Image (cartoon, helix red, strand yellow):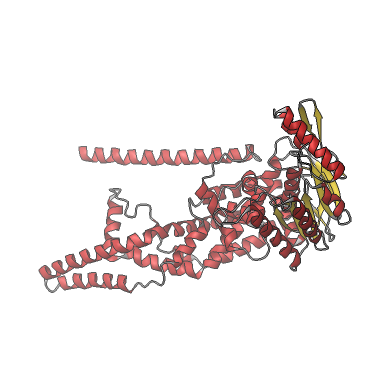
Amino acid sequence: MEYLIFAAAMVGLVFLLMLKGYYDYKSSEKRFIQSLYRDYGELPDREYKPEQFANISHYYLKHQDGFGIDDITWNDLNLDEVFMRINYTYSAAGEEYLYYLLRKPCMEEKELCRREELVGYFRSHQEKRVAFQVVFHKLGRTGKFSIYDYLDYLDRLGERSNLPDYLALGLVVCAIGFMFINLPMGLLLLVCILVRNNISYFKTKEEIDPYITSFAYVFRLLDAVKSLMPHECKELAEEFDVLKKSSAGMNKFRRGSFLIMSSGRMSGSGNPLDMAMDFLRMGFHLDLIKFNQMLSEVRKHVSDIDKMATLLGRMEAMIAIGAYRQSLEGYCIPEFGAAPAVNACNMYHPLIGDPVKNDITAHKSVLITGSNASGKSTFLKTMAINSIFAQTIHTCLADSYQGAIFRTISSMSLRDDVQGGDSYYMVEIKALKRILDLIGSKGEPVLCFVDEVLRGTNTVERIAASTQILRSMGGNNCLCFAATHDIELTHLLEEEYDNYHFSEEVAGDDISFSYKIMEGRATTRNAIKLLGIMGYDAGIIRQAEGLAEDFLRTGAWKEKA
């Protein structure tokens, strides 16, 4: 009787623990749902580890057909940080697709309009948005590897056969049958076969265990699709139709999967049921047989898995764009025209707090001059990022934005390639050559941004070469925005480029910048004045000013001022 009471008490304790676990789970889910309503537009607090962030690009790397933002432009514009600013996703599928969007400017207005429809739908249907976000949160991330890494890893296993495992199973059956003929010999034979099976089991188990993680995420994709089905609506009819077709053929993958996917598999938990199942697995190779069947099914349905990851990621990316818009102080929907031109009003940079907003109207290429630290580079980045935003997230940080469908490329924040052995000048001319090659190729007009062209060489050759390079970039198939300190270029290129500038005000030992772009070429210089403000010796300042004034007057340098 005492044993029964003890057993009943233990069962009751286990039940209470399970009940508490369920209650905690539901409470956590409820709090998460409340936060989705309450904190819409507030960026989730997330720390990006280097290895995790590196894997976000892997969906893009698998779908690189057509024009994309190249690595130089991506780094020039600090688009890693921009991506982190707009990443309101909760799943690996969502954030990998959002990253893909940012690197693949869309060349079709029809697709951009479809994205706008989805963003608008989720913004105006709050309950539907939250229901989808709960599903994406459960789908979750993949850890330090992308789902596409896992699918690639499956190919490394090569072709696999169940024949050895069926043989192991057959030997056990034969040994059991032999026991009816000769019990002692049958038992001995069974023990020897089980030992042999166990040894081969653990050898194969060690080989396949790392690949089971990929199966786990495929299951989560299938579960996410199943969870979304009750929320089917006419606005997402196309997406749901593809999701149904892609998941329908995966029933064979699911059947019997508990042999592989059970959390108690070879866990050493001490649970009698888990121990019995582990014994069956080791002796009869049941999970190895099922693994090979599941592997075969995954290989048959890689395209379906890709479609599910793509569509789930696409829907969450549209939700993220809506949340990003909610966080902004102002934005506009871009308008597109056929002419290679840009017209933007009150445009600003996504990473600058309390930004200075600027207007620009450019029907031909633009040459920007101005003092050091006056805002030239920031304006170029602002213009470039908004042009990319227009064709990716269909959101511009401006009161209004009109432009063409462009292929955007830049040469701005370059460095010496120490490992490759290239000097700064070599890195620069290679970067500029790729822009000229893009301009010369067939396709949409090019929108290019160049900061201080050929700064890595001497003045005479820099101005001569820069003139011809910028002239080539200012042609019919390209709209170029270039910043320079070389005032000579504003005269040499005045037929091809409109002149704009940034300026500053110096009052005593203080210098201030408006960061507002203005028409015309720059007429002030501040490099030597800045030396004085920073505390350089007055003699250095005086002699430098004398040399500069003399050169401007005579066109030749003197040995001494």
Decide which of 142, 268 is in the foreground and name it.
Answer: 142
Instruction: Name the quadrant containing residue 171.
Output: bottom left
Residue 382 in the image: x percent, y percent? 74, 46
Decide which of 278, 514 is in the foreground and name it.
Answer: 514
Image position of 14 (left or right of 122): left
- Is residue 517 visible in this depiction of the protein? no
Mark count: 0
- Is residue 267 visible in this depiction of the protein? yes
Image position of 189 (left or right of 368): left
Residue 548 in the image: x percent, y percent? 80, 39
Q: Is residue 169 above or below residue 467?
A: below
Image position of 269 (left or right of 67): left
Residue 497 in the image: x percent, y percent? 85, 54
Residue 259 in the image: x percent, y percent? 36, 60
Q: Is residue 469 above or below residue 459?
A: below
Decide which of 215, 29 is in the foreground and name it.
Answer: 215
Q: Tell me which residue sits at (21%, 64%) in the image.
A: 195
Can you say which quadrant of the picture contains the C terminus?
Answer: top right
**Residue extending farthest top:** 508
Q: Tell me which residue sits at (82%, 50%) in the image.
A: 367
Q: Is residue 390 above or below residue 356?
A: below
Image position of 59 (left or right of 441): left
Can you say which quadrant of the picture contains the N terminus?
Answer: top left
Instruction: Name the quadrant containing residue 192.
Output: bottom left
